[in-house]
Amino acid sequence: MSVISVEHLSKEYQIAKKEKGLRGAVKNLFVARKTIVRAVNDISFSIEKGEIVGFIGPNGAGKSTTVKMMSGILTPSSGHVYVNGTDPQKERIKVVQDLGVVFGQRTQLNWDLRMGESFEMLKHIYRIDSGLYEENMAMMNEILGINEFLDTPARQLSLGQRMRGDLVAAMLHSPSVLFLDEPTIGLDVDGKYAIRKFIKEMNRKKQTTIILTTHDLGDIQELCERLIIINHGIIMEDGPLEELIDRIAPYKNLVVEYFDENAVEHEKAIILSHVGNMVTYRFQKADLTAAQLIHDISAQMRIKDVTIEEAKIDDIIRIAYGGKENGEKE
Amino acid sequence: MIATIQHYWRVTIVNIRIHLLTILEYPASIAGWALSNPIQFVVGFATIQFVVARFGTINGWGYEQLAFLYGIAVISHALSMIFFVQGWFMGYYVIEGDFDRYLLRPMSVLYQFFFNNFNIIGITDLIPGICVFTYGCVKVGFHWSILAVFELLALIIGATLIRGGIYMMLGTLSFWTKSTNEFSGFTQEFFDKTTMYPLTMYPRALQFILTFLIPIAWVSFYPAGAMLHMDGGAPALDVSFFGAMPFVTLGIGIVVMVVASLFFKVGLRGYESAGH
């Protein structure tokens, strides 16, 4: 059985179109023009136990709406969500007892009181027994070092500390599923490192199934074994990052610096650019290796230096979103 | 069932602890409320005194009976402020997406909404309420008996539920209007004026509305009148006071609360969170 299964899920919102100016405002009172926006449009997928899935898409693509439907916050307009076989619309309490959710943009820690009080509260809300509570606190402290600021109120925590606290809060009751909505947003290098490490450890130690939305390429490369790319409420891609790269960018570039302005041609590589002594070749990974290409051209002419360029992840992601081709600016 | 009650009880205890801790974080704010809230009721009481001094009685209710009536009104107001004041601010929770977190925790959303935020400062209303009521009891020569204690408990709980249920229903409208619906000033004013004077003072149409549609008259007027054995001045539709009225208040309170909870559930289904 899948840990999460999403079947033909859609969500529509009514958005009121307001006309500008005083005249418009008066008009709005009488004729409210409403348009229906499909934030999520008939998507289906399933996620197995122990997967780390990146939910990727531009702003307004429908990621958060989907996560909120999966966690039972929003009621779907149509379709179904099952978490561990249970519909959060029907048995919300049963679903959330085994679910942890972190919203990077807002905290669940008590603003005024020492952070430890928030954890104590959660211990009672989730009915966590003392043994498990102590064990989880100790284990998470080892990874995140939260004991240092356990006595600080959330309002005085740095963003990185607060985020660590929120991760602990979400995992205290050992949920089997964890949703992270932009967990690394605004964090510095250290903060991101700690949070990624935490995600990996939880996944490894507890087989926690993790779904995260992010705009951070580091998160995507380091954490996500699988990407679900969503845009305009539709799933554009669903698979591992490598597969995506192979399909969208099945090529590499080789930049060669010669000693003069003459360049060698190769039957299996095209020349993308030739400026002065610098020549950029592009070849298909299936046809040719970089080593072979260097070998072939250096046999004909002396070369000074080479650089191999892989397709940039952000370009790949952008193309997968349905954006422009590599290199073009929007 | 017992496990559930224990669960909610423990969380309630922790909640109370957390509230006390928060209050200790901000002692100045408490001092402010403790001074300003009682003044409001001293002024209210003075108004009644002035009216009675000027006109003698109001439809058969003298100064002593009015103190009794007003005491009940203030006590139920204070309790509704302690437990249900969040209803006034429900719109903010709807607009800001603050129900997200409650929906993610394994407890009733309504319980969390009211008890995560319950308002210990409401006690600053409760104390003047008890003073006025005690004063009224002494002045009317209230006859205490076991039945009277039960009647009082029933009517105070009922009156608190009526107020709380109405705040909740007004707040729930925010799920549709998608605005914060600032009803707080309006409801407080309306409740104040309609619970501190005898209902018979108002036009018949309003008496009818306050008896059957928005049952505010049951907060203080009917049960107080019944307990004081007031006669004459029968309110809307010539309902006379009868002894069981305090228990009717309790029944109405429960009904209002149940209706408000169902209404809230319907509203929550249309909850849109914030940001997509």
Image (cartoon, coloured by chain):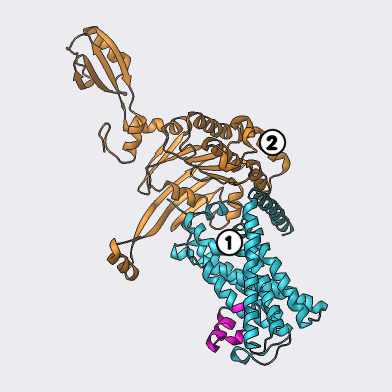
Chain colours: A orange, B cyan
- A120 left or right of B86 in image: right
Q: CA distance from mark 2 to mark 1?
A: 36 Å
Q: Residue furthest left?
A: A262
Q: Position of residue B100 (x, y in %)?
A: 53, 53
| Above or below B253: residue A21 | above
- A282 left or right of B140 in image: left
Q: Position of residue A165 (x, y in %)?
A: 58, 39
Label 2 element class: helix
Decide whether residue B210 is among the magenta residues. yes
Q: Residue furthest right?
A: B145
Label 1 element class: helix
- A85 left or right of A133 in image: left
Q: Quadrant of residue A308?
A: top left
Q: Amino acid at mark 2?
A: Glu
- A48 left or right of A285 in image: right
- Give neighbour class at mark 2: few <14, some 14-19, many 20+ (Cα, 10 Å): few
Bounds of the magenta segment: B194-213
Q: Residue at x 70, y 76 (%)?
A: B155
The chain under label 1 reads: B
**Mark on residue A305?**
none
Q: Residue at x 67, y 76 (%)?
A: B70
Q: Specify the quadrant that holds the N terminus of chain B.
A: bottom right
The reply to whether residue A300 is in sight is: yes
Residue on which disc 1 sits: B86
The one nearer the camera, A114 or A301, is A114
Q: Residue at x 82, y 79 (%)?
A: B145
The reply to whether residue A176 is in sight is: no
**Main secondary-structure element of the magenta-colored stretch:** helix
